[in-house]
Image (cartoon, rainbow, N blue to C red):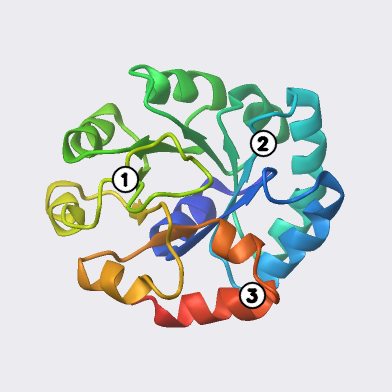
């Protein structure tokens, strides 16, 4: 089992949060992609598999764990609380369900950190009050990963950091060309999905993005 103290410390120190989304990566590529992302230097890695069964997600997560632990990168499971509890992942991520954080805590326990998606300043403040350990804030731009979500833009990033003391990971359409304006708007941490997973050389691209972050 992971050491919760080191996991929470890794969360606090994290700047680049990767998501291994099975909308972009085939199950057969999960191990090699995990290794490439870790070698490049991602600080956190989430497994997101919206169209796969709990059994499939558990199997893939168990393949990822030895690689992630070798690099000291926490594994975060998207939505599937029971899978997170069974495999002992370092983190879990939940959406905008009103009871999401409390429900997650009840399932995974205090040793696993809980992140929550937020799409406005009000939601960001509420997530902190609910006891989330970090928040995702976005989508900043329109994104192919979640095309139904209306982008919130970058104008509230600085205010979110003023109102919320948790780690805030800006998400949604983040890529190298947009990073300067995102950082100028006040971002300190970002989530990157397709720009990493579809890069010609994943390791090089991770390093490039990491080098641009404050």
Q: CA distance from mark 1 to mark 3?
A: 28 Å
- Residue 15, image x and y in percent? 42, 66
Give the alpha-carbon distance from disc 1 to disc 2, as whole Å.
22 Å
Q: How many residues crowd around disc 1 within 10 Å: few (fewer than 14), some, or many (20 or more)?
A: some
Q: Which residue is mark 2?
A: 49
Q: Which mark is residue 197?
A: none
Question: Can residue 111 be seen?
Answer: no
| Mark 2 to mark 3 CA distance (whole Å) | 22 Å
Which tag, 2 or 3, sits closer to the chain's start?
A: 3
Q: Nearer the viewer, residue 119 or 9?
A: 119
**Which numbered marker is on residue 40?**
3
- Give the label, 1 or 2, closer to the camera: 1
Q: Which residue is mark 1?
A: 151
What residue is at 57 percent from the left and 66 percent from the top? 42
Q: Nearer the viewer, residue 153 or 35?
A: 153
Instruction: Look at the picture and state if 104 lies above or below 213.
Output: above
Residue drawn 35% across and 55% down? 170
Look at the image and tell me whether residue 127 can be seen. yes
Q: Disc 2 vs disc 3: which is toward the camera? A: 2
Vertical arrangement, residue 192 with respect to residue 22, above or below: below
Which image quarter: residue 67? bottom right
Q: Residues within 10 Å of mark 2 (few under 14, many from 20)?
A: many
Residue 91 as seen in the image, left or right of residue 168: right
């Amino acid at each position: 089992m992971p050491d919760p103290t080191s996991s929470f410390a890794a969360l606090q120190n994290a700047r680049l949060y990767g998501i291994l989304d099975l909308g972009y990566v085939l199950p057969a590529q999960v191990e090699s992609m995990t290794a490439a992302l870790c070698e490049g230097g991602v600080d956190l890695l989430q497994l997101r598999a919206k169209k796969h069964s709990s059994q499939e997600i558990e199997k893939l997560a168990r393949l990822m764990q030895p690689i992630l632990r070798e690099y000291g990168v926490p594994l975060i499971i998207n939505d599937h609380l029971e899978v997170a509890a069974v495999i002992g992942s370092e983190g879990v991520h939940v959406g905008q369900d009103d009871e999401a954080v409390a429900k997650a805590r009840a399932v995974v326990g205090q040793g696993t950190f809980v992140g929550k998606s937020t799409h406005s300043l009000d939601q960001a403040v509420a997530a902190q009050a609910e006891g989330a350990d970090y928040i995702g804030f976005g989508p900043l731009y329109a994104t192919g990963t979640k095309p139904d979500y209306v982008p919130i833009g970058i104008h509230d990033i600085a205010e979110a950091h003023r109102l919320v003391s948790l780690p805030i990971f800006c998400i949604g359409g983040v890529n190298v060309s947009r990073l300067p304006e995102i950082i100028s708007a006040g971002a300190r941490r970002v989530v990157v999905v397709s720009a990493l997973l579809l890069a010609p050389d994943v390791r090089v691209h991770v390093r490039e993005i990491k080098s641009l972050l404050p």
